[in-house]
């Protein structure tokens, strides 16, 4: 019974934890501009994250070592360092976007300017990391993030023409004033949002924090194979709401208020309250995850003591990295950059870093030194390689497309 | 590998099994850096590992307790935590709550 | 493959816009009009939902405040254009006027909401709908 409870809790946490500011903004933005014509990218992205997160979970459960611990060992110090720098910078950019998202959610609820909320949000993130147990912070924010299911309820309440949505989803091409360049650009952004690198760092380090062993493989796999796809459905619901309400009206999504607006239209003030709490929890949870991931990547690469399973003073450099990253995030946001714009760039740069993040995972998941008998089978490797090729194409195309489309305009 | 006869004779690929691997302090299980370099004793036949280098410290082979997905070493008087201790004493320990486990 | 397509699309766009100054202005007008229409309709939805008690006033104020900034951005980006022919000048004046009307309506809503005067905001609904429709037509002038 306790085991079933643990597995259920893990799945619910995975669903709530799947959606972050990148998913919220990108899915709504894409739904408003392309309807459901880009829904397939979410499906492809979710399969990809499932595939690679499962490998990470397996490596942790079998070897007790997180991904970045092994990156340097298997790629050597030079390639390892390149991977570290790329992954770390993208994660830091994501952290900036998440903290901006927390502040924007608070602004929408209170009417007080987000720049006033922002230092408070950053401080609260630090305080939770400093004082709250790992399993508790993961569960609380994951479960609160589940409130975003309100997007699915809103979609039903809006009473869309389901046949038309399905019709759009089965026709993957640009519509209206959009061309193939913007279609490809936002396709890559959506891909980057679904497969953001910090998700695998956090997932694998979380496995160590919770002391996974071989026995926990079932838990790890159920989190991945049930939780993530349901999280993907949540993403599609966000996209669907925008497709129903904004596409016909010619409204482009550029603010977090617009992301939440369909829920208010469908469900009124109560719906708005729920969605704002959900957005707050999802972005705050992701801010915790990205801040921790900044510490995880550097500490694991350097071999420093890390993690919340020891007292803060025993992992002093790990905690200093987190504090420095939070201060950097705060200073960046204080320049009054638009957090939504930061989010849009963060998912594209995430796409650029993807092959560097995911290649080492594929290598390690094939190494009997770490995973023993639980090596990748031929099918997993074949699909893994197909995805690696896909990630490489997306990564190479991202920057040229950003220039050609002027950032998707 | 030199040392007690019981654990000698294991053939390891130094680059694959030792280089860049995580070091763990046997005493408390703490993470203690990475193997930055491996010092070989080329006079022996076949060559054996003489020491592991991490940061500014040299860990002689007899301190190696076990080699698995990480290398466990007996740290004793070596100062592997120099920088961590410095940061701890100058920054982290000054913040309230640093001594307590999270709740 | 995607890149090849993207580059081809870019070439077509660059060539077509170099060829004809009127065409270049038309496409700038369409772009700005679509951006502004998006903001005007967002404002319209916010006011309608506020009237139907579906939205809190501070969130509506927030959404409309952001929309106002968006319209300003679209307006100023279009006014930086350089009309060089007679046709272009006529279009420039007409589009500028439509964008100004849109901005006036959105600003009026923002002020009304700031003063807690929902009735005044609702009075702008007609202007917003008209403005949205006008901008929509200009938005169709070019791809």
Image (spheres, coloured by chain):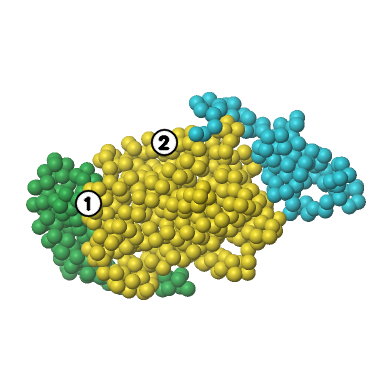
Chain colours: A yellow, B cyan, C green
Q: Secondary structure at mark 2?
A: helix
Q: Secondary structure at mark 1?
A: helix
Q: Is residue A371 left or right of residue A181?
A: right
- A237 lies above or below B42: below
Front residue of A371 and C128: A371
What residue is shown with label 2? Answer: A124
- A133 lies above or below C110: above
In the rendering, at what x and y percent does residue A23 appear?
Answer: 40, 55
Mark 2 surroundings: few (<14), some (14-19) or many (≥20) residues within 10 A:
some
On the question of residue A402 being in view, the answer is no
Q: Quadrant of residue A117?
A: top left
Q: Is residue A38 left or right of residue A364?
A: left
Q: Residue at x 12, y 61 (%)?
A: C130
Q: Residue at x 37, y 62 (%)?
A: A236
In the rendering, at what x and y percent does residue A287 appear?
Answer: 44, 44
Mark 1 surroundings: few (<14), some (14-19) or many (≥20) residues within 10 A:
many
Front disc: 2 or 1: 1
In the rendering, at what x and y percent does residue A130 appear?
Answer: 49, 34
Q: Is residue B27 left or right of residue A96?
A: right
Q: Which badge, 2 or 1, comes first in the chain's sequence? A: 2
Front residue of A167 and B41: A167
What residue is shown with label 1? Answer: A268
- B77 lies above or below A300: above
Q: Residue at x 38, y 46 (%)?
A: A144
Q: CA distance from mark 2 to mark 1?
A: 30 Å
In the rendering, at what x and y percent does residue C74 appear?
Answer: 25, 56
The residue furthest front is A1
- Residue A330 badge: none
Chain letter behind tag 1: A
On the question of residue C3 being in view, the answer is yes
Chain letter behind tag 2: A
Q: Work out which quarter of the rendered image holds the C terminus of chain A and state it.
A: bottom left
């Amino acid at each position: 019974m306790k085991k079933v409870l643990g597995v259920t809790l893990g799945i619910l946490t995975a669903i709530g934890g799947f959606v972050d500011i990148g998913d919220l903004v990108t899915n709504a933005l894409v739904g408003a501009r392309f309807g459901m014509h880009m829904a397939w990218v979410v499906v492809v992205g979710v399969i990809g994250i499932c595939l690679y997160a499962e490998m990470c979970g397996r490596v942790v459960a079998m070897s007790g070592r997180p991904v970045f611990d092994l990156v340097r060992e298997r790629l050597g110090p030079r390639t390892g360092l390149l991977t570290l720098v790329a992954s770390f910078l993208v994660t830091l950019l994501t952290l900036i976007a998440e903290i901006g998202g927390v502040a924007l959610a608070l602004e929408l609820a209170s009417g007080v300017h987000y720049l006033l909320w922002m230092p408070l949000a950053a401080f609260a993130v630090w305080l939770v990391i400093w004082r709250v147990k790992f399993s508790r912070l993961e569960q609380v924010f994951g479960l609160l993030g589940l409130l975003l299911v309100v997007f699915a309820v809103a979609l039903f309440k809006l009473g869309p023409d389901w046949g038309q949505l399905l019709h759009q989803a089965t026709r993957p091409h640009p519509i209206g004033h959009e061309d193939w360049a913007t279609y490809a650009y936002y396709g890559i952004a959506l891909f980057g949002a679904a497969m953001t690198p910090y998700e695998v760092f956090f997932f694998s380090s979380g496995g160590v924090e919770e002391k996974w062993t071989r026995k926990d493989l079932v838990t790890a796999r159920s989190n991945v194979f049930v939780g993530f796809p349901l999280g993907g459905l949540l993403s599609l619901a966000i996209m669907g709401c925008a497709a129903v309400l904004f596409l016909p009206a010619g409204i482009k999504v550029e603010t977090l208020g617009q992301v939440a607006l369909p829920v208010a239209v469908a469900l009124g003030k109560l719906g708005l309250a729920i969605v704002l709490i959900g957005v707050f929890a999802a972005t705050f949870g992701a801010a915790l995850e990205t801040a921790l991931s900044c510490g995880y990547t550097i500490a694991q690469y350097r071999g420093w003591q890390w993690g919340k399973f020891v007292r803060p003073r025993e992992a002093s450099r790990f905690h200093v990295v987190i504090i420095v990253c939070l201060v950097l995030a705060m200073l960046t946001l204080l320049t009054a950059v638009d957090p939504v714009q930061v989010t849009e760039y963060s998912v594209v740069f995430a796409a650029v870093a993807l092959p560097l993040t995911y290649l080492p995972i594929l290598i390690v998941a094939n190494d009997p030194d770490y995973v023993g008998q639980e090596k990748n089978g031929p099918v997993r490797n074949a699909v893994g390689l197909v995805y690696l090729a896909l990630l490489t194409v997306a990564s190479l195309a991202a920057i040229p497309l950003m220039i050609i489309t002027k950032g998707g305009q | 590998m030199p040392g007690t006869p019981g654990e000698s004779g294991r053939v390891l690929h130094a680059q694959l099994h030792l280089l860049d691997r995580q070091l763990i302090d046997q005493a408390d299980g703490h993470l203690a850096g990475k193997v930055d370099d491996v010092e070989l004793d080329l006079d022996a036949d076949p060559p054996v590992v003489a020491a592991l280098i991490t940061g500014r410290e040299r860990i002689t082979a007899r301190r190696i307790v076990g080699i698995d997905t990480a290398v466990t070493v007996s740290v004793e008087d070596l100062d592997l935590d120099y920088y961590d201790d410095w940061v701890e004493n100058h920054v982290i320990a000054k913040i309230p709550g640093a001594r307590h486990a999270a709740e | 493959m995607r890149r090849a397509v993207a580059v081809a699309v870019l070439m077509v766009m660059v060539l077509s816009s170099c060829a004809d100054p009127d065409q270049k202005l038309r496409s700038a007008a369409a772009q700005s009009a679509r951006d502004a229409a998006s903001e005007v309709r967002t404002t319209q939805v916010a006011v309608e939902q506020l009237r139907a008690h579906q939205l809190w006033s501070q969130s509506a104020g927030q959404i409309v405040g952001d929309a106002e900034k968006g319209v300003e951005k679209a307006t100023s980006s279009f006014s930086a254009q350089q009309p060089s022919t007679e046709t272009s000048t006529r279009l420039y004046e007409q589009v500028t006027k439509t964008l100004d009307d849109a901005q006036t309506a959105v600003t009026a809503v923002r002020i009304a909401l700031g003063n807690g005067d929902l009735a005044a905001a609702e009075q702008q609904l007609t202007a917003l709908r008209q403005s949205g429709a006008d901008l929509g037509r200009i938005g169709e002038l070019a791809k």
